[in-house]
Image: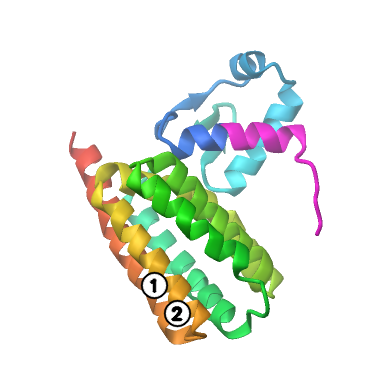
């Protein structure tokens, strides 16, 4: 296993990404470099590198002479992300169903009871984190293609942002997520690649519609 400690800039990026994902930093929010560096007790160089990482993840945009700000959320952006990323994720699900061996699914299957516990407690943030931990393991273990893995990894932070909005917007989304999670594991274990891919596509289609409704509601407010 390749274990690498996160650099300071990666830790900063993760901290800011969590605030963006959970809508504590809202779309359009300005990220003042000097003020933020002082607040986080880091150098501006480290902060700028963190900004570059966040820009690559489509969470912020950096404008010349105007600095960094949190990306807006539009209907087109939402549709584009779900269309493309869930195409990749459905391919990942199919590959996992076809290629898993031995105990490779044991730790993934062990995540399901955690998700069920957080669902029972209506702990949205914890369930959200666990679900994306599941995806991260699957990408690392089963993608078997650096371009597939890189594209998914670069877009997952943006999906985290949108999916968190979906969970906050409609409380039933957590229950839907649990059912999809259960079906996906069952179909992967049965090596039913087509059904596993269909589970992911169905989930993406439904969640996309929830996010679009939430975006429209915020735009009208």
Q: Are marks 2 and 1 in contact (CB under 8 Å)?
A: yes
Q: Secondary structure at mark 1?
A: helix
Q: Which residues are magenta?
A: 1-15
Q: Is residue 14 left or right of residue 23?
A: right
Q: Name the residue beneath numbered marker 1.
A: 183
| Above or below for 192 versus 3 | below
Residue 132 placement (x, y as % from top left): 52, 53
Residue 186 placement (x, y as % from top left): 44, 76
Disc 2 to disc 1, C-alpha distance: 6 Å
**Quarter that holds the N terminus:** bottom right
Is any part of residue 162 visible from this angle? no
The residue under the point 67% across, 80% down is 101
Residue 57 placement (x, y as % from top left): 57, 48
Q: Secondary structure at mark 2?
A: helix
| Above or below for 23 versus 129 | above
120 within the magenta span: no
């Amino acid at each position: 296993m390749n274990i690498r400690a996160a650099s300071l800039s990666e830790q900063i990026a993760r901290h800011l990404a969590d605030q963006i994902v959970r809508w504590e930093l809202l779309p359009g929010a300005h990220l003042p470099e000097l003020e933020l560096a002082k607040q986080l007790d880091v150098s501006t160089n480290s902060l700028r590198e963190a900004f570059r990482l966040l820009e690559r993840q489509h969470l912020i945009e950096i404008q010349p002479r105007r600095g960094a700000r949190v990306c807006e959320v539009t209907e087109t952006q939402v549709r584009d992300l779900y269309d493309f990323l869930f195409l990749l994720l459905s391919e990942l699900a199919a590959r996992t169903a076809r290629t898993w061996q031995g105990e490779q699914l044991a730790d993934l299957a062990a995540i399901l009871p955690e998700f069920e516990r957080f669902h029972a407690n209506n702990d949205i943030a914890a369930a959200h984190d666990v679900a994306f931990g599941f995806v991260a393991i699957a990408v690392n273990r089963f993608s078997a293609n650096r371009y597939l893995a890189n594209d998914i990894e670069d877009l997952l932070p943006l999906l985290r942002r949108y999916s968190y909005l979906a969970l906050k917007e409609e409380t039933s989304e957590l229950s839907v997520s649990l059912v999809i999670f259960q079906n996906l594991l069952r179909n992967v274990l049965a090596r039913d690649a087509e059904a596993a891919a269909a589970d992911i596509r169905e989930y993406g289609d439904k969640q996309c519609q929830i996010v679009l409704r939430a975006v429209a509601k915020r735009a009208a407010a």
